[in-house]
Image (cartoon, rainbow, N blue to C red):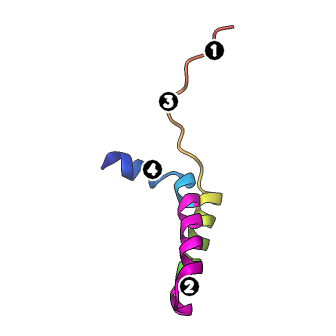
Amino acid sequence: MKTLLARLQEPSTYAGLAALLGIVGVNLPDAKFQAITHAVAAIAGALAIFLGENNGPTPPPVAQ
């Protein structure tokens, strides 16, 4: 559950959600549902743009 909540805080998750909703919205038969999914996709895409990625642990230095 913690992993899912952590993923929901990353902008890349919103970008993926926007893409999936955009694809689903194209295939819905009712124009009202298409409009709703496109609006949610637009919001998710905007969140992906404006939210910063969470900084995870610093990777170890590369030996040269």
Q: Which residue is mark 2?
A: 34
For discs 3 and 4, the disc positioned in front in the rendered view: 4
CB-based contact (under 8 Å), mark 4 and mark 2: no
Amino acid at circle 3: Pro
Considering depth in this image, is 20 or 7 the residue closer to the camera? 20
Q: Name the residue at 64% across, 9% down.
A: 63
Range drawn in magenta? 15-34
Crowd rating for badge 4 (residues with CA inside 10 Å; few <14, some 14–19, many 20+): some
Q: Are marks 3 and 4 in contact (CB under 8 Å)?
A: no
In the displayed structure, would residue 7 be above or below residue 55? below
Q: Position of residue 49 (x, y in %)?
A: 65, 59
Farthest top residue in view: 64
- Return the mark for residue 57: 3
Which is more foreground, mark 2 or mark 1? Answer: 2
Disc 3 is placed on an element classified as loop
Q: Which comes sooner in the sequence, label 1 or label 4?
A: 4
- From the image, tell me which residue sits under label 1: 62
Q: CA distance from mark 4 to mark 2?
A: 26 Å
Identified by mark 4, the residue type is Arg
Labels 3, 1: front one: 1
Tag count: 4
Q: Which residue is mark 4?
A: 7
Magenta span dominant secondary structure: helix
Residue drawn at point x = 55 percent, y = 18 percent:
60
